[in-house]
Amino acid sequence: SKLKLGLTKTRKGITEKIDSLMKSYVKVDEEFLEELEEILIVSDVGMNTTMKIIERLREEIKTNKISDIEEVKSVLKRILEDLLTTTKENTLDISPSPAIIVVIGVNGVGKTTSIGKLAYNLKRSGKKVMMVAGDTFRAAAIDQLKVWGERTGVNVIHQQEGSDPAAIIYDAIQSAKAKKTDVLICDTAGRLHNKKNLMNELGKVFKIIEREYPEARKEILLVLDATTGQNAIQQAKTFKEVADITGITLTKLDGTAKGGVVLGITSELDIPVKFIGVGEGVGDLQPFNPKDFVEALLS
Ligand code: GDP
């Protein structure tokens, strides 16, 4: 499947190692668990999350007197699936219309690309979509969003570089209302040099949305780059302090063996991953589903 293909490098890291570990043991014992622990740690699952997984596995093995390796694998799958499932849905909450999706994240993580792909997907599903170039600090970000607008046939509201992000989002909301748009997707600036700045900038945007578009369902999507591994978790913690993030988009999973970071993100932050990026093309943003992900990882 396309998901398996996108996870090729991660699968090489985790799947192959776990497979060969399972082949080299007939029965599970403490040594097996230690080796598994090491595999998870080097696969960027993260220390805390790895400990959590191993603890649960040890417990289940003990309580249910499991020794068969195949059985251990299915228990492991269940534990991972459970970790990837938060108390919140993995799907976007954008119906009924109107809805607004504010996309946040550090520069370079794939924010603009993800917005373009998301616009494309939503348009294909029959929604009337509009994008707004709210990252006014970089001329390149505005131009890039315009290119995605042309590519997807989705209208892009923009002003020149240096204009006030809150003002342009105000304009976009009026336009979205006038045109009866189903989903307005907002790009935002991703300068993370200090938390106070970020809080001020995003705060203004959220305030405008609250005042001008209270009827809209609101999603705040944080974009993280999987290739940065544990750094992505750190970024997520910082953004969580300044915004009520409703979901995560994890990009560039195709380019890294660090796909295990998905487990760390969900278990440490309790924010659902809603999309994963597995390539640069317009069709390469996939809805995230815990079961499918674990199946692709440990099949
Ligand atoms: P922004 O600065 O956060 O808006 O980042 P961009 O959207 O400009 O993306 C930065 C680079 O990452 C671009 O070259 C994108 O094509 C690339 N990119 C984004 N998402 C993915 C993905 O899922 N897979 C791969 N391989 N590349 C991606």
Image: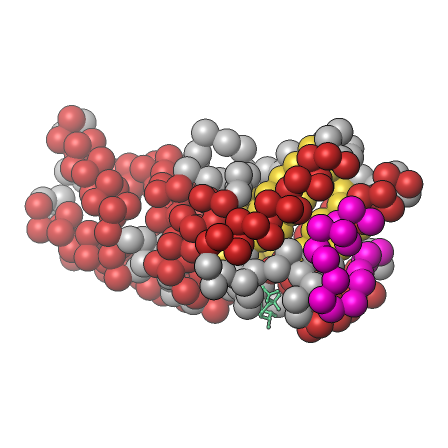
Q: Position of residue 257 (x, y in %)?
A: 38, 65
Q: Where is residue 252 in the image (x, y as percent from the top left)?
A: 51, 64
Would you say residue 215 is visible in this rendering? yes
Residue under the point 76% across and 52% down: 167
Instruction: Tell me: 127 left or right of 64.
Output: right
Relative depth, front residue between 62 and 131: 131
Furthest residue in direction bottom, as rendered? 140
Instruction: Tell me: 140 left or right of 200.
Output: right
Q: Is residue 41 magenta?
A: no
Quadrant of residue 278 in the image?
A: bottom right
Residue under the point 86% across and 39% down: 177
Q: Position of residue 23 (x, y in %)?
A: 21, 55
Q: Is residue 163 magenta?
A: yes
Q: Position of residue 63 (x, y in %)?
A: 15, 26
Furthest residue in direction top, as rendered? 63
Q: In which quarter of the image is the N terminus?
A: bottom right
Relative depth, front residue between 152 and 194: 194
Residue under the point 53% across and 49% down: 199
Would you say residue 129 is visible in this rendering? no
Furthest residue in direction right, as rendered? 178
Q: What coloring was used for the rendering?
A: secondary structure
Write down the region rendered in magenta: 155-171
User: Which quadrant of the frame does ligand 1 lie within?
Assistant: bottom right
Residue under the point 15% across and 48% down: 33
Instruction: Tell me: 120 left or right of 242.
Output: right
